[in-house]
Amino acid sequence: MLLGCNKAVAESEEKDDSHYFLAVKAENLGKEKESEELYIKGISLSATSLVSRRCIEKCIELSSDKESYISLLLDKYTDDNALLTACNFYTEQNNFDKVLELTKDISVETSNNELVKLRLLSLIKKNNPAVHTISRTWFLSRPYSKEHQTFFGEYKAAFASEDTDIAAEKAEDNIEVMGFRNEIFRLSYGGAYSYIESGKIREMKFDFTDELMSDMGKACLYGKKDSYKSLPMLQKYLSFSMNEVNEANKKNDSTAQNNSIDDAENDDTEQKGLSPSHKAYYYHFYTGRILERAGRGKIAASEEYKKALDYSFSDYSYDNALWYYLNAILGSSAQNAVIEAEKFADKWHDAEYFDDFLDTLCIRLITNKNWKAIYRAYIKMSEYMSDELASQFAYISARLIDTKRLTFTDIEDVWTVLEIKSEHIYKDLLEVSDTAYRRALKSGIRPYYSVCAAWQLDDDDILFSDIFYQHKKTKEFKRDIEAETLLLGYLKFGLVDEMYSEWLNLRNGVSLEVAAELAEAYQKSGTEKDDRYSKALRIVSYAANKDWSTPSKKATEQLFPRNFLDIIQEEGSKYSVSESLLLGLIKSESYFDPTVSSSAGATGLTQLMDSTANDVARKLKMQPFDLSDAKTNIAFGTYYISELTRRLDNSKILALFAYNGGITHVKNWRKSAKLEYGENLVNDLFLEALPFAETREYGRKVVGAAAVYAYLYYGKSTASVVSDIMK
């Protein structure tokens, strides 16, 4: 009746989305009847399809006539989420026939896992033997999930029951495979290894899928204390012949499986599996992993990874094998790692996948004082690296020139080895370093190398817009206007909590521009005792990683907010620590979340350990104390960074290193560096030489953030701030 009335009303009223948001407000106030009526009106009167959908979903939740609204939902939407809503309802009603009818066309290999699980449970309830074939396909073809784990328990229980009427010829084999994959999911590798050691899985009448072969490799890699002894087992399961591989390649993998559940129910044939070349990939890849883990040689392992590259079957499988290959080479020789990386750089698919390899390569080359190799990597590979790593190699190369570690002869040698045409060679070192610094200005979403390059160039023509969030490439971003309309609607009606819950589901389509508005509203709702400031920052930071458009002033300020400013001003003034440095430190340490605690035991905004806090409290005569209190935490952190600065010859950058890595470590690192390099390294190169990756990255984060804060709010150039911190 209400649906009919709503149709009539829709003909006389102009469409807008307000009914939904007013309904949410009414529901929050406990006005159930009013909210339901508004949701009903919103179904046909909402101007946005997604808002109309939310009205239907709320009516399903609140109405006594749920089935009518479910039918309406399915009439308008055919995606997995709509089916899942309906199937959850019919499962609760024990209407398994309806679940089977609704899910007859879904794909076992691509549809929502929860939806597949509900279909399989309905097949069990209806004593349908197709459950065996479909569940096997599901367990063999998909990454293992919580839905798989839940169904595994139900499946075992069904076939352990004496009351079941289902024909269970395949159940025993299925339970074996399901149990094996469940052990891997639980990280019980010893338990998983016992499954394959028994030989039962190998005796089954199906070939292995990618998921199963990968799990086999993990079981062999981690299932025995001496993983080398598992190599014969890996050979048994993943053996292949070149004849099989070549024949399969000729047929162009014609054995690919059909994805349709409907077909699977009508086809009682066994799992067909994958081509032999997939077995070859996993065999060589995990042989390499086992050789490395067993300490049987990096070179031998690298040979296996290189063989795996020849059998890669996807962008990810290629990048994964290449990453392990390059790291194995790096374990033996940094120079050889540069040469090998050059050969493959134009072939890797995801540049960021190789960031940690390149960062480790950089520190190894610095440790070895192989300055020419750093410049060589910059010249040969920077166009293929991610923004940040390309800027890192460019900046360090320029600084090595400025500090006279790289000579013009070195530069010429590199260009000769790389066979770069003479007309492109620079005339002098100043031109080489200037070009490298200007390349370093584009460091993407992490500003450290951009602001450092601006500091070294000291060029008045360089604008903040030239260095902040500049990318060497553009990334495709697909904006979801309907999602943004819904999220902004929540803000318009003051429903910030509902907005954040929705954002978690819709965030991939939210632009940086809209994310800044969402973050600003959520930030304003925060207090000194909750995590809303942190969540607001995550909203806009997530968008900045997806949408590479130039940030507006609002977006920039939301990416670098000044939460807890009154406390920061007071404590910074008291202990002579700049506000921009404190803001950069707190942003890097806790993301402005006063409630956060680290796994190591650090607490609050400035992430202080109890031992450090107790020492500071004793000196400040502030006992007892509460580190979850924002004022106390900032006061202690500010005092501590000021003390570290004083004890380290008033060096702010060394104090930051000590804040993260400990003052004793910093003093020892300085001594070691002086012995290693024959002099004290300038502080920005000393950062690159630090043996702790966490401390290196920490220094980059705080310096970059402090420079941006100083520019945005305190009228300082980023160059002047970096200069002050680095001196």
Image (cartoon, grey):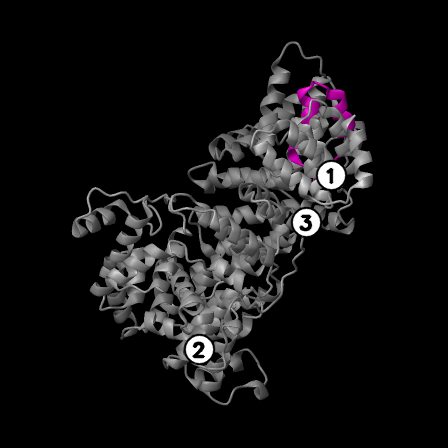
Above or below residue 465? Residue 597 is above
- Crowding near the residue tagged with mark 3, few <14, some 14–19, many ≥20 C-alpha atoms within 10 Å: few
Above or below residue 302? Residue 111 is above
- Crowding near the residue tagged with mark 1, few <14, some 14–19, many ≥20 C-alpha atoms within 10 Å: few
- Residue 144 showing in the rendered view: no
Q: From mark 2 to mark 1, how far is it between C-alphas?
A: 53 Å
List x then y, in percent, for residue 356: 47, 58
Magenta residues (range):
88-114
Q: Which residue has dot 3 on it?
A: 242
Disc 3 vs disc 2: Cβ atoms closer than 8 Å? no
Magenta stretch encompasses residue 343: no
Mark nearer the viewer, 2 or 1? 1
**Identity of the residue furthest to the top in this view:** 163
Q: Which residue has dot 1 on it?
A: 79
Q: Residue at x 22, y 60 (%)?
A: 643
Q: Residue at x 54, y 46 (%)?
A: 286
Residue 121 placement: quadrant: top right
- Position of the C terminus by quadrant: bottom left
